[in-house]
Image (cartoon, rainbow, N blue to C red):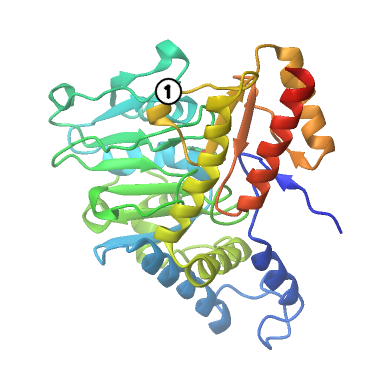
């Protein structure tokens, strides 16, 4: 069996020990005589899985007690509507920073339900930087302030949070959750599609401060009301059972094999450092974003020609480095190096790039 190094932006690699354990437990989960895919979500044994996924997440992320953890479906994209439906209800207004396509989608969806105000944007330079924010330009009466913490497509990230005072900060953390420690208490809501750094596709994790629950607009569909899920322990309807189980295994790996988020951060900084150092010294390859705003998770780069980009992507794939093509809307290359990508995969990619440069530079 030969496994590739998969640099996909999502769904993406899962830790090999997780896949092996899932394989071992596939036909008979802990003596139950069935796989986790087959069991009732209301069974005692499944209750053990979902509650241990939640308590591991709380422990690993150090989530304060006044926050609820919700295991939902619909992807991060559903949160673009769910957040305004539940929060934009006092002054019917929210602030947005446009740092890429996902941030813009969140803004456009919210604009269907109330006044969505753009505080800053980096669209003028194809989202290659995080704009400086001046708190005096924020709406004092906003119901929330939205950012996309790590911009998966462009390869930038916020390293400093906006000072929003009493206005709840809401962040899309789909592509950076669990990559490094984060102070949950600074946020009203954190949400993430799980398929980047937590689990396979199908699960959306929402971490929400309790006082923000229970104020949804009257038009809010029952399934899009945070209260519905908070009141029912994410079991109002059938949750994405198997994905939550894999999420539990990933969290167990993160806690017990990696040693927590501080350790994960060191590994992620090392991986990103290898690629950015190479890009800073290369004559053929160039990073596409402002150095201070570089993402730890998604490394974007180009050569000087589209032909060479295409040649690189093709030859890389032939050598076991797959999914290095940049997002269809921006071109170039992108190496997504989430938690499960081993350091060795990144070292080998950098060596391959160096070799490609020698032959094509
Ligand atoms: C992938 C991604 C999304 C979309 O997630 P879905 O789960 O496919 O809806 C939204 N935001 C960010 C930052 C992403 O990386």
Residue appearing at x 35%, y 35% in the figure:
158
Q: Residue 340 at what x, y percent from top left?
A: 60, 54
Residue appearing at x 66%, y 40% in the figure:
8
Quadrant into which the C terminus falls:
top right
Residue most extreme to the right: 1
Q: Would residue 232 be seen by someone viewing this image from the given angle?
A: no
Q: Residue 238 at what x, y percent from top left?
A: 56, 63
Number of marks drawn = 1
Report which quarter residue 181 is drawn in.
Answer: bottom left
Residue, disc 1: 290
**In front: 350, or 31?**
350
Q: Residue 316 at what x, y percent from top left?
A: 77, 34
83 lies above or below 126: below
90 lies above or below 43: above
How many C-alpha atoms fall within 10 Å of the one at disc 1: few (<14), some, or many (≥20)?
few
**In front: 102, or 37?**
102
Q: Residue 47 at what x, y percent from top left?
A: 51, 77
């Amino acid at each position: 069996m030969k496994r590739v190094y998969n640099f996909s932006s999502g769904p993406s690699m899962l830790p090999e020990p997780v896949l092996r354990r899932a394989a071992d437990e596939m036909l008979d989960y802990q003596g139950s005589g069935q796989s986790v895919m087959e069991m009732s979500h209301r069974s005692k044994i499944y209750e053990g899985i979902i509650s241990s996924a939640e308590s591991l997440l709380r422990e690993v992320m150090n989530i304060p007690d006044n926050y609820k953890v919700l295991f939902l479906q619909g992807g991060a994209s559903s949160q673009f509507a769910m957040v305004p439906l539940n929060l934009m209800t006092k002054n019917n207004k929210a602030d947005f920073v446009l740092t890429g396509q996902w941030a813009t989608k969140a803004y456009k969806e919210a604009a269907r339900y109330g006044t969505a105000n753009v505080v800053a944007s980096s669209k003028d330079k194809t989202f290659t930087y995080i704009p400086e924010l001046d708190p005096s330009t924020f709406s004092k009466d906003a119901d929330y302030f939205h950012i996309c913490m790590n911009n998966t497509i462009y390869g930038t990230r916020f390293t400093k949070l906006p000072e929003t005072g009493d206005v709840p900060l809401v962040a899309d953390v789909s592509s950076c959750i669990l990559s490094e420690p984060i102070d949950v208490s600074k946020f009203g809501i954190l949400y993430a599609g799980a398929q980047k750094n937590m689990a396979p596709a199908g699960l959306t994790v929402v971490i929400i401060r309790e006082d923000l629950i229970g104020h949804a607009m009257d038009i809010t569909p029952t399934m899009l009301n945070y209260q519905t899920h908070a009141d029912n322990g994410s079991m109002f309807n059938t949750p994405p059972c198997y994905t939550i189980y894999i999420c539990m295994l990933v969290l167990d790996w993160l806690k017990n094999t990696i040693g927590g988020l501080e350790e994960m951060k060191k590994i992620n900084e090392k991986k990103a450092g290898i690629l950015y150092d190479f890009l800073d010294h290369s004559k053929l390859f160039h990073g596409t974003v402002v150095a201070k705003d570089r993402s730890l998770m998604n490394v974007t780069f180009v050569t000087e020609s589209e032909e060479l980009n295409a040649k690189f992507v093709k030859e890389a794939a032939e050598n076991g480095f797959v999914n290095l093509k940049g997002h269809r809307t921006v071109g170039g290359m992108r190496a997504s190096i989430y938690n499960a990508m081993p350091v060795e995969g990144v070292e080998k990619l950098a060596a391959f790039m160096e070799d490609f440069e020698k032959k094509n530079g």
